Image (tube, rainbow, N blue to C red):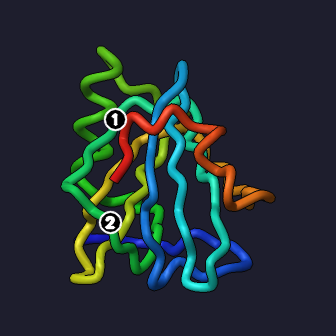
Amino acid sequence: MDNRKSLNYKIGFADSEILSYNSNNYSLFFYLQTWNGVILKIEFKEYIHFLDTVCIDVSDICENDSSSTLKKALENEFNEIPEDHGFKLYQFIDTNDEAAVEIVSKDVLITEVNNSSNWHEDSSLIGNT
């Protein structure tokens, strides 16, 4: 059973579009255009798992603490899973209410990109959609 909890941010994620994603060291970055045209940079820090099923349109971004994906990612990362591992599963929910992107990381940071015409300069666009 899924136990999704929407990420809290001042702009809702419904009707958003993934513009691109890339990784750098141990961080995974997504660039998302929200329903009102604002570009968000979403950084997943110290990620250990990433699965994308070709999602472009997003209805929500959630944290899910009961998915088997988190357990599998932790089993792959650790011989013995510590109780205080600090990892969480984040999911991009598509318009069919399915988890289309899954990321296991220690933290997430959401910031607005000030100059929306140059958002791509902050990214190598290896995951351009």
Residue at far front of view? 117
Relative vertical location of residue 34 with respect to residue 42 in this rendering, above or below: below
Secondary structure category for the residue under label 2: loop
Q: Residue at x 43, y 70 (%)?
A: 17
- The residue identified by callout 1 is 49
- Asked if residue 95 lies left or right of residue 20, the reply is left
Residue at far top of view? 79
Q: Position of residue 8 (x, y in %)?
A: 65, 73
Crowdedness of circle 1 by 10 Å Cα count: few (<14), some, many (20+)? some
In whole angstroms, how far apart are the C-alphas of marks 2 and 1? 19 Å
Q: Residue at x 63, y 85 (%)?
A: 36
Q: Assess whether mark 1 and mark 2 are in contact (beta carbons under 8 angstroms).
A: no
Name the foreground residue: 23 vs 97: 23
Secondary structure category for the residue under label 1: strand
Q: Is residue 85 visible?
A: no
Identified by mark 2, the residue type is: Ile
Q: Is residue 109 visible?
A: yes
Numbered badge on residue 113: none
Relative vertical location of residue 103 with respect to residue 99 in this rendering, above or below: above
Crowdedness of circle 2 by 10 Å Cα count: few (<14), some, many (20+)? some
Name the image quarter holding residue 33: bottom right
Q: Position of residue 9 (x, y in %)?
A: 68, 73
| Lower position in the chain sequence, tag 2 or tag 1 | 1
- Asked if residue 26 lies left or right of residue 96, the reply is right
Name the foreground residue: 5 vs 54: 54
Judge depth for marks 2 and 1 and give the one in front. 2
Identified by mark 1, the residue type is: His
Numbered badge on residue 56: 2
Q: Quadrant of the N terminus?
A: bottom left
Name the foreground residue: 55 vs 101: 55
Name the foreground residue: 26 vs 104: 26
